[in-house]
């Protein structure tokens, strides 16, 4: 009522005081406009508050969703880890590999900063239930004071603050407009004004964008960091599993490539195909395809097309070997100097020669029958067999400039001991075995499937430089003077120790691709030896040497002296005995380029001596292997003495 009274009064007042009433109307209008402005502002602020509230709601939803996702990934990772370690026991091997792959899929991609497929799907599902705020216009018309106002509203700070330090208000508005959709993904949007709690929760998206992560570990690391805020240990365990799997796959691929480099294409392909990763790893599939193509292009070699060369221990110091004593002529005839050997090896490698062993040429099948095999090599490569006789480092060679022992160095590699002029012992590569090992380290393709030479051993002085024969311990009355002298100089001799050390070297040699053969225990001439002596000798070898080398089915005849003159062994008494003792491979010396004889019962092969005698008198017989004039050691006394009656 009072109000209406006043209203009625007002016109009268206006009529009476025109100027007053006019100014009052203006004042009213101004007040009205002001009120209207205020109302508009109120509406605007209300609108903004509502929007911010919705953004906050949406943000919290997303945080919850991310947390749930992280928990799911963590749970998968932990389950995957447990399952992966016990996959053999649970029989779930394939399943676990798949699970590991799925976990990897869930992990955000480093470069795009995008969430995984699964996360994207979750995000889509979320969006469909929300207002599509991403279409809201940028708040470019807002005055700076609005930002200030909103900034003051602490509950809104994360949505509003990104523009701080971002340049113009327009820029920041744009950023603000996009913040809702990108804040978790774009690291820069998460400004220093976030609360500590929010920072922790959003660590994931920041870290995913770190560019310095190693490519091969990116997924694993991203996973680890993504989950840091939730269950760091579990996340790290999950990432560890993925890292291990990546390492494993890399190693398998490397090993396959190494096999293929040594022409073991089947081995390389099978290694890749039997790995669980094969079905999904395109590198595995491509490599297998490439190896198959290489094998298809290979040339097959039959045993009859393969030559076999041999050496004795190499002469390191020619001034000592050729010092004019009673052994000089023998060394000059049947030995090769280290310098000659290294040159020959390099030339043969350059010419395309590749070492194969006897088992590459023929093998006993499941019925006990010897069967020929073929060697597959790329065009331009030629297989050959390498052997070395008498790798025992006899007492008689002491002081003659020849290595004294094979040893394993601290790296686990086979080396020689060599006694220098001043009497000090050095460890290095002074004979065929370590020299070939080093050469193959540099040139893996010199060894077919990693196979190296055949090392022929007698036993009477022990093997490989170790005094492993029982006679060193029993000291029989007829003990050789060399052995007596050695025992007098080695009062700490212990047979078990010598044998253990010899076995250690033999084990490493076998692992490195070497094969062992019997050269008879007592360096017997098998063409003239009595049956009784042959049997005793064979038993000596089996008792003293077989346990150290794991046994052998190869005989490399001493003096090259075969048990017959070239006809088949069948029916030969010595052969029947040796066969009954497990010997299937027999090698003589015939100096022919090729000689192979095979029946169901045995594989027999001729060998060629690459030594001073052959190089001096018959360089043409070696011309297919190397040019003697490029190799012959000028420190050899010439003429090399002729053999007495051959
Ligand atoms: Zn010999």
Image (cartoon, rainbow, N blue to C red):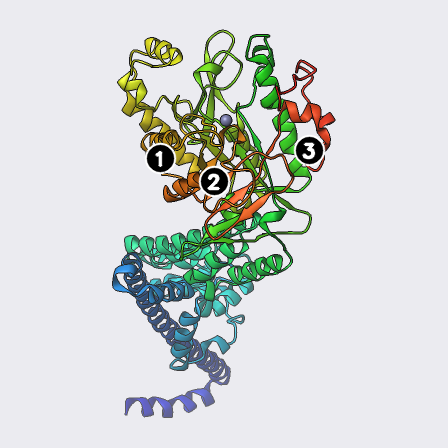
Q: Secondary structure at mark 2?
A: loop
Question: Residue 172 location in percent, x, y?
Answer: 51, 62
Classify 10 Å Cα crowding around label 2: few (below 14), some (14-19), many (20 and above).
some
Q: Mark 3 — residue? A: 622
Q: Is residue 329 above or below residue 511?
A: above
Q: How far is the residue under mark 2 from the one under mark 1? A: 18 Å
Q: Quadrant of residue 194?
A: bottom left
Question: Residue 524 location in percent, x, y?
Answer: 45, 27
Task: Please tell me which residue is depicted at 31% across the width and 32% down the height of the picture.
Answer: 543
Q: Residue 91 or 37: which is nearer the viewer?
A: 91
Respond yes or no on whether mark 3 lies under 8 Å from ligand 1. no
Q: Mark 1 — residue? A: 546
Classify 10 Å Cα crowding around label 1: few (below 14), some (14-19), many (20 and above).
some
Task: Please tell me which residue is depicted at 46% across the width and 14% down the height of the picture.
Answer: 396
Q: Is residue 149 visible?
A: no
Mark closer to the observer (2, 1): 1
Q: Is residue 107 above or below residue 508?
A: below
Q: How far is the residue under mark 2 from the one under mark 3? A: 26 Å
Q: Quadrant of residue 535?
A: top left
Q: Quadrant of residue 57?
A: bottom left
Q: Earlier in the sequence, mark 2 or mark 3?
A: 2
Q: Mark 2 — residue? A: 513
Question: Residue 439 location in percent, x, y?
Answer: 57, 34
């Amino acid at each position: 009522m009072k109000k209406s009274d006043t209203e009625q009064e007002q016109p009268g007042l206006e009529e009476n005081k025109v100027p007053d009433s006019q100014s009052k109307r203006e004042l009213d209008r101004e007040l009205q406009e002001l009120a209207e402005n205020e109302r508009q502002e109120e509406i605007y602020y209300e609108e903004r508050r509502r929007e911010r509230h919705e953004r906050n709601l949406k943000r919290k939803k997303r945080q919850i969703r991310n947390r749930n996702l992280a928990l799911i990934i963590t749970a998968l990772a932990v389950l995957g880890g447990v399952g992966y370690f016990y996959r053999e026991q649970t029989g779930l091997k394939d399943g676990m590999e798949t699970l590991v792959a799925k976990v990897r899929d869930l992990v955000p991609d480093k470069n795009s900063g995008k969430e995984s497929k699964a996360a994207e799907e979750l995000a889509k599902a979320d969006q469909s239930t929300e207002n599509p705020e991403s279409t809201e216009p940028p708040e470019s018309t807002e005055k700076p004071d609005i930002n200030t106002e909103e900034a003051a509203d602490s509950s809104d700070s994360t949505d509003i603050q990104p523009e701080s330090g971002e340049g113009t208000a327009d820029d920041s508005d744009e950023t603000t407009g996009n913040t809702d959709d990108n804040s978790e993904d774009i690291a820069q949007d998460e400004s220093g004004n976030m609360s500590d709690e929010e920072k922790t929760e959003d660590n994931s998206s920041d870290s995913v964008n770190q560019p310095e992560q190693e490519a091969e570990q990116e997924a694993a690391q991203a996973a680890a960091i993504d989950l840091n805020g939730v269950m760091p240990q579990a996340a790290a365990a999950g990432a560890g599993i993925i890292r291990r799997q990546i390492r494993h796959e890399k190693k398998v691929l490397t090993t396959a490539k190494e096999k293929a480099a040594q022409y073991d294409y089947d081995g390389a392909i099978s290694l890749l195909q039997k790995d669980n990763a094969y079905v999904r790893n395109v590198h595995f599939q491509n490599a297998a395809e490439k190896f198959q193509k290489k094998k298809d292009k290979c040339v097959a070699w039959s045993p009859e097309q393969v030559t076999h060369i041999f050496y004795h221990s190499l002469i390191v110091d020619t001034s000592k070997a050729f010092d004019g004593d009673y052994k000089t002529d023998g060394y000059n005839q049947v030995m090769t100097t280290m310098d000659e050997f290294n040159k020959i090896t390099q030339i043969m490698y350059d010419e395309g020669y590749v070492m194969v062993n006897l088992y590459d040429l023929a093998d006993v099948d499941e019925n006990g029958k010897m069967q020929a095999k073929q060697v597959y090599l790329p065009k331009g490569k030629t297989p050959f067999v390498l052997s070395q006789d008498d790798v025992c480092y006899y007492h008689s060679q002491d002081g003659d400039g020849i290595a004294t022992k094979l040893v394993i160095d601290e790296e686990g590699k086979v080396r020689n001991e060599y006694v220098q002029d001043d009497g000090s012992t050095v460890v290095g590569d002074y004979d065929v075995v370590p020299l070939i090992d080093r050469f193959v380290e540099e040139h893996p393709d010199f060894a077919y499937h990693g196979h190296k030479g055949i090392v022929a051993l007698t036993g009477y002085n022990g093997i490989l430089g170790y005094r492993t024969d029982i006679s060193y311990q029993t000291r029989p009355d007829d003990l050789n003077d060399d052995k007596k002298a050695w025992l007098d100089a080695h009062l700490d001799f212990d047979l078990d120790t010598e044998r253990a050390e010899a076995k250690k070297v033999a084990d490493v040699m076998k692992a490195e691709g070497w094969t062992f053969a019997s050269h008879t225990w007592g360096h017997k001439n098998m063409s003239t030896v009595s049956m009784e002596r042959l049997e005793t000798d064979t038993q000596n070898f089996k008792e003293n040497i077989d346990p150290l080398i794991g046994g052998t089915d190869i005989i490399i005849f001493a003096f090259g002296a075969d048990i017959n003159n070239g006809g088949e062994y069948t029916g030969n008494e010595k052969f029947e005995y040796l066969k009954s003792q497990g010997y299937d491979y027999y090698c003589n010396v015939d100096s022919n380029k090729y000689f192979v004889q095979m029946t169901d019962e045995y594989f027999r092969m001729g060998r060629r001596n690459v030594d001073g005698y052959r190089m001096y008198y018959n360089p043409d017989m070696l011309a297919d292997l190397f040019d003697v004039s490029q190799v012959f050691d000028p420190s050899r006394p010439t003429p090399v003495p002729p053999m007495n009656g051959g």
